[in-house]
Amino acid sequence: MLMIESILFSMGMLLLGAKILGHLCQMKGIPSLTGEIIAGIIIGPILGLVVPGNFLFGFITFGLAVLLFIAGTEVHYEDIK
């Protein structure tokens, strides 16, 4: 049971941090994606609150794929031209 609690705690910390920093960045006029990525970097490697295991690596990989898809949908192609 301890492993499940650890996974849920890790996922909860990452989601909460991403939501908070994403919202703060969006209020400052910065894309929320930037805040979400910074939250993951701060919570994971810098503070060491989240230590990924096999399940969390798979979840992170899926999350990155969704994140890249969302970032691609927010691109304004007219601005790139």
Image (tube, grey):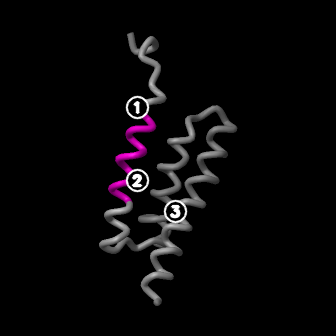
Residue at the spot of label 2: 63
Secondary structure beneath dot 2 equals: helix
| Magenta segment boundaries in residue numbering | 60-71
Which residue is located at x 65 percent, y 45 percent? 23
Mark 1 vs mark 3: give the one in front. 1
Which amino acid, by three-letter code, is at mark 3? Answer: Leu
Residue 47 counted in the magenta span: no
Q: Residues within 10 Å of mark 1 (few under 14, many from 20)?
A: few
Q: CA distance from mark 2 to mark 1?
A: 14 Å
In this view, the residue in front, 19 or 1, is: 1
Q: CA distance from mark 2 to mark 3?
A: 11 Å
Asked which quadrant contains residue 75, the reply is top left
Mark 2 vs mark 3: give the one in front. 2
Which amino acid, by three-letter code, is at mark 2? Answer: Gly
| Mark closer to the chain start, 1 or 3 | 3
| Mark closer to the chain start, 2 or 3 | 3
Residue 8 in percent (x, y) is at: 51, 74
Q: Residues within 10 Å of mark 3 (few under 14, many from 20)?
A: many
Residue 49 in percent (x, y) is at: 49, 73
Residue 28 in percent (x, y) is at: 67, 36
Residue 31 in percent (x, y) is at: 56, 35
Residue at the spot of label 1: 72
Residue at the spot of label 3: 14
Q: Residue 23, labelled with which disc?
A: none
Q: Residue furthest right?
A: 27
